[in-house]
Amino acid sequence: MKSLPLHRWDVTPAEARRIQEELRRRVRAERPHTISPERIRRIAGADVALDTARGRAIAGVLVYSFPALEELERAWSAQPLQFPYVPGLLSFREVPALLAAVERLRESFDLLFCDAHGYAHPRRFGLACHLGVLLGQPTVGVAKSRLIGTHAEPAPEPGAWAPLLDAGETIGAVLRTRAGARPVYVSVGYRIELQSAIQLTLAVCDGYRIPRPTREADHYVEAIKRSC
């Protein structure tokens, strides 16, 4: 799967913010598009482990059948870290490695889950949005912690959620995936609506707090980081 060459990566933080402002228009233009579970045959999960001691980002992508969630393929890539840590600009640090990992896949996928925020971002263009736009594929952001916004606590049962709000806008969902566990933060990445993102996140949960695709991607890249 090839990505669209929409911008350079050797940019300053100020240039990176301008790129986010420009590309987020594509997310807004695609927001009415909804992908339903019935149309999905393969899903994927992606994550990145930062190996700062060696100056590299290790990205992993796992592809599964859907809804059975049988693993079909996995691929990884290690790329030099070329962008500094700047809050709100995580994608410029991690997406190059993620794109390289995706390009190594033989299997295609219909939907990608990212261990990151999407629309729930100060400029409404988090990593899940950025990766989705470059790949031209539907993406969902499922983050472990809040970046921005306020919310009520969702009810304790699995599947309960509360809107994540910022400046009067619903930018995501605070979703309970497991009884008694802290919620996760779900937001639109690209070519999907929030309700579908919530429904599909629950569909790939298997009794743990973190959905299986991003949880196993996290284990995968951490194992690579330790071994090579």
Image (cartoon, rainbow, N blue to C red):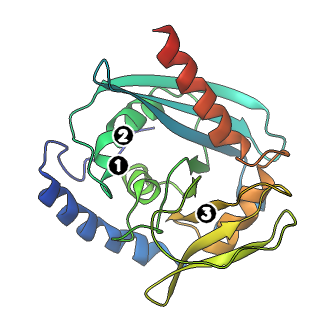
- Dot 3 and dot 1 residues touching (CB under 8 Å): no
Could you tell which of marks 3 and 2 lies nearer the N-terminus? 2
Quarter of image, res 37: bottom right
Question: What number of labels is visible?
Answer: 3
10 Å neighbourhood of mark 3: few (<14), some, or many (≥20)? many
Can residue 4 be seen here?
A: no
Could you tell which of marks 3 and 1 lies nearer the N-terminus? 1
Q: Where is residue 79 in the image (x, y as percent from the top left)?
A: 32, 25
Q: Position of residue 200 (x, y in %)?
A: 73, 59
Which three-letter amino acid code belongs to the residue tagged 3?
Val
10 Å neighbourhood of mark 1: few (<14), some, or many (≥20)? many
- Dot 1 and dot 2 residues touching (CB under 8 Å): yes
Question: Callout 1: helix, strand or loop?
Answer: helix
Tell me the quarter of the image containing the C terminus.
top left
Residue plotted at (52% across, 17% down): 224
When the figure is inspected, residue 222 is found, relative to residue 43, above or below; the finding is: above
Can residue 30 be seen here?
A: yes
Residue at mark 1:
91
Question: Callout 2: helix, strand or loop?
Answer: helix
When the figure is inspected, residue 140 is found, relative to residue 161, above or below; the finding is: above
130 displayed left or right of 71: left
10 Å neighbourhood of mark 2: few (<14), some, or many (≥20)? many
| Residue 8, label in figure | none
Residue plotted at (35% across, 49% down): 91
Between 6 and 206, the one lying in front of the other is 206
116 displayed left or right of 95: right
Which three-letter amino acid code belongs to the residue tagged 1?
Ser
Distance from disc 1 to disc 2, alpha carbons, whole Å, reads 5 Å
| Residue 94, label in figure | 2
Quarter of image, res 54: top left
